[in-house]
Image (spheres, helix red, strand yellow):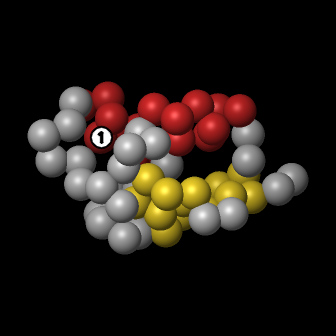
Amino acid sequence: MATIKIKQTGSPIRRTKDQRATLIGLGLNKMHRVSELEDTPEVRGMIRKVAHMVQVEG
């Protein structure tokens, strides 16, 4: 299955608890961290929820 790299570019400070939990679920919790995950609809939905704090690299 295809994979995508996700980089955290925004801070979770002053964000809601569910957005913070989504970042942790994606394997991100500190700035500029990169996580490589399988490209599934569930992961795409999580990325969409925190799109303002992450950057998809491929």
17 lies left or right of 54: left
> Can you name the residue that lies furthest to the left here?
14
Which is more toward the observer, 41 or 51?
51
Q: Secondary structure at mark 1?
A: helix
| Disc 1 packing (10 Å; few <14; some 14–19; many ≥20) | some
Task: Identify which amino acid the numbered label 1 is placed on.
Answer: Arg
Residue 28, picture quadrant: bottom left
Q: Is residue 27 above or below residue 16?
A: below
- Residue 28 seen in the current view: yes
Whether residue 24 is visible to the viewer of this picture, yes or no, is no
Left or right placement of residue 31 versus residue 1 in this view: left
The residue lying toward the viewer, choosing from 51 and 33, is 51
Residue 40 falls in which quadrant of the image?
top right
Q: For the C terminus, give its image quadrant.
A: bottom right
Locate residue 32, reporting x and y percent: 37, 70
Which residue is located at x 45 percent, y 42 percent?
51
Residue for point 86% across, 53% down? 1
The residue where tag 1 is placed is 20
Residue 45 image point, x, y percent: 58, 31
Name the residue furthest front.
52
Q: Residue at the location (63% across, 38% down)?
A: 44
Q: Position of residue 55 (x, y in %)?
A: 49, 57
